[in-house]
Image (spheres, rainbow, N blue to C red):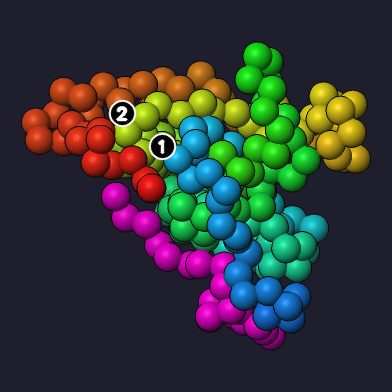
């Protein structure tokens, strides 16, 4: 699977609005938009987000550079961005903690808080009006199957809205309510693609995961 590297650190050379993303990160006093995980072996959740730069760049709301400028300016990050074309962009290494969930709590009966600690974040370039492309559903499922194979386990899938909505606010974990990926995201379509991907991996010759060896330490 092809993944384009674009790590959110001070070396990032992408230029937007006259400055590199790296220099924007450096201006915040950070070296990168991630931190170590406290318990790397416990990563078992994938949080699905949608993101648009429509407020900054109305003509090109899904332009990678403008979306990543938002991340740099606000000091937030996710592990991956999937563009409208289906191109997968790696922003943060999986073994490190990205800052995508904020104050958050898993749905019942899990109830774990601080979801960044044990999750991977995947951003889909989309707005409530645009919805999601077929390429995005396909590549999202492909990426998730690949992650599960490498980590040697099935993951739990939640939307940002499921962990950072009214319940998180009521619990005093955050002030604002997240609404992404929203009702335009076709959970059934995604989960069907995921299921098909898992099955083809299981039946394919020579592609079965060597589970004990692929768990990230
Ligand atoms: Zn989000």
**Residue at 60% across / 28% down in the picture?**
158
| Residue 100 visible to the viewer | yes
Q: Is residue 131 above or below residue 107?
A: below
Which residue is tagged 1? 144
Q: Is residue 96 magenta?
A: no
**Residue at 54% across / 77% down in the picture?**
12
Give coordinates of residue 115: x percent, y percent.
Answer: 65, 38
How many marks can you see?
2
Q: Which mark is residue 197?
A: 2
Q: Earlier in the sequence, mark 2 or mark 1?
A: 1
Judged from this view, the residue extending furthest toward the left is 205
- Find numbered disc 1 in the image and state the secondary structure of the residue it sits on: helix
Q: Nearer the viewer, residue 125 or 150?
A: 150
Give coordinates of residue 27: x percent, y percent.
Answer: 74, 81
The magenta stretch spans which residues?
A: 1-24
- Find numbered disc 2 in the image and state the secondary structure of the residue it sits on: helix
Q: Is residue 33 above or below residue 128?
A: below
Q: Is residue 134 above or below residue 54?
A: above
């Amino acid at each position: 699977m092809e993944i384009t590297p674009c790590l959110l650190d001070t070396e990032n050379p992408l230029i937007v609005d006259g400055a590199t993303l790296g220099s924007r990160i450096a201006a915040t006093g950070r070296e990168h938009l991630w931190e170590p995980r406290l318990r790397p072996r416990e990563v078992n959740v994938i949080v699905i987000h949608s993101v648009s730069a429509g407020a900054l760049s109305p003509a090109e709301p899904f332009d990678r550079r403008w979306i990543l400028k938002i991340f740099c300016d606000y000091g937030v990050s996710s592990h991956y961005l999937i563009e409208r074309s289906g191109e997968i962009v790696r922003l943060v290494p999986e073994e490190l903690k990205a800052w995508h969930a904020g104050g958050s709590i898993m749905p019942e009966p899990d109830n774990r808080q601080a979801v960044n600690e044990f999750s991977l974040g995947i951003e889909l370039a989309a707005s409530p009006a645009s919805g999601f492309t077929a390429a995005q559903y396909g590549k999202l499922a492909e990426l998730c199957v690949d992650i599960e194979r490498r980590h040697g386990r099935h993951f739990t899938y939640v939307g940002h809205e499921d962990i950072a909505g009214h319940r998180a606010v009521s619990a005093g974990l955050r002030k604002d309510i997240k609404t992404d990926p929203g009702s335009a995201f076709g959970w059934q379509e995604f989960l069907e693609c995921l299921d098909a991907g898992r099955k083809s991996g299981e039946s394919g010759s020579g592609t079965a995961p060597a589970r004990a060896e692929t768990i990230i330490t």
